[in-house]
Amino acid sequence: MAEGHLDPQLWTGALDQLRRAVAHTTSHCDTTSLSSLTQFQAQLDLLDVTQEVMIITDEKWRLPDRVTGHCAWEQAIVTHPRLQHRPVLVVTHGYHHRQFGPMHWVVSYPSFFLQHCTAAAHGLDRARNLPRGFSSLNHRPALHRLYLGYRLHQAGLLPEVIFSLGAESPGIWRPATQDWPDWDRFTQLLPMEFHDHLCNDHTVDHPAYHEAYCNIVTETETEWDHTTQPQPYEIITEKSYKPFLAGQIPLFLAAPGHMAYLERLGFEVMWDLVPPGYDLMSTQDKVQAIVALVARGPGWIEEFYWAHQAEIQHNWHRIRSGQVQLQLIQEIQQLTGLGHAQNT
């Protein structure tokens, strides 16, 4: 499936484990694709309040207003006359669980686990002396992905990375990139393709996951928005879990706190790979650190890979064990008080 939203129909099966854990009966709607508050309020009207718990799935939950600090979408739930006294779970791809109303919570339960794709993992066999130590697949040309490719190109390191990047209207980034030397020359390289005829899905069948030791994960969002103004955005998608399934070293270009979140879920995130404080660095500083790592060459990252087999095997077993799903469910139950009397 191309990079984008999870098919809402898949949420029905994906939510089964969480549903059973919090209530006997639930009412569910998906609001990921909605663009206006009016549309969202109309969806709320359709929830069946005769059920025990209302579940709203939304992959990219809306940010609070920069001035007031309030989220209008959350306020719409809290003030909705039929939901004020009903338990509501907003299931997102963020890093945190939190309460925003008397019986209303935002919880993290990433769909990658929900789709039960972990059983599709390959083994951990990997060849020695691979010609390129790093890989990074990028379908949608978001600003942070463009900046990574641009900086690798400026350093003459793109040939050292299995790198793909789309070419969707690079001109829209002109306000952000106008001060980047030779930007126009870089855009002439787009699109960069590497077996792009293969399906971009939740598996690790693509050669980029087996022909490199380290996967540079460029998440859907960082703290950059289209005007390059800092804007915290927590989102974790299947891209972040693929290195664990593929038995690779993960190197994350994502929002602040991304690595800490994965560590809390029990994964080894290889802190010794990155500079101190990397997880909270700006996108620009993270890209600079990544370029410096790539510059050390495929031989260096191969040595790092073989020296961290225990961590790689731990991540491979953990993501396939089902324990992360159970941890998240237990955290949600503890926060909300829902479902404790049930057999999960």
Image (cartoon, rainbow, N blue to C red):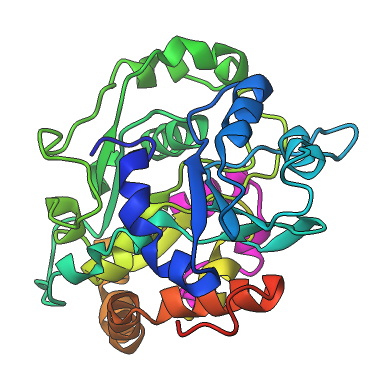
Taking depth in this image into account, of 49 and 261 the one nearest to the observer is 49
Q: Residue furthest right?
A: 68
**Can residue 26 be spotted in the picture?**
yes
Position of residue 40 measured from the top left corner of the image (x, y, whole percent): 62, 29
Question: Is residue 130 shown left or right of residue 200?
Answer: left
Tell me the residue at 35%/81% (across/down): 318
Question: Is residue 183 shown left or right of residue 167?
Answer: right
| Image: 9 above or below 187 | below
Find residue 139 and report its image quarter: top left
Q: Quadrant of the N terminus?
A: top left
Q: Residue furthest front?
A: 50
Position of residue 77 measured from the top left corner of the image (x, y, whole percent): 73, 41
Tell me the residue at 56%/34% (across/down): 46
Tell me the residue at 23%/42% (across/down): 159
Dominant secondary structure of the residues highlighted in magenta in the image: helix
Position of residue 184 measured from the top left corner of the image (x, y, whole percent): 42, 13
| Image: 99 above or below 79 | below
Taking depth in this image into account, of 267 and 10 the one nearest to the observer is 10
- Tell me the magenta residue range: 269-292
| Image: 19 above or below 57 | below
Find residue 101 and report its image quarter: bottom right
Position of residue 288 measured from the top left corner of the image (x, y, whole percent): 54, 48
Q: Quadrant of the C terminus?
A: bottom left
Taking depth in this image into account, of 288 and 22 the one nearest to the observer is 22
Find residue 120 and report its image quarter: bottom left
Tell me the residue at 16%/38% (across/down): 194
Question: Is residue 141 shown left or right of residue 32?
Answer: left
Asked if the magenta segment contains residue 130, the reply would be no
**Can residue 295 be spotted in the picture?**
no
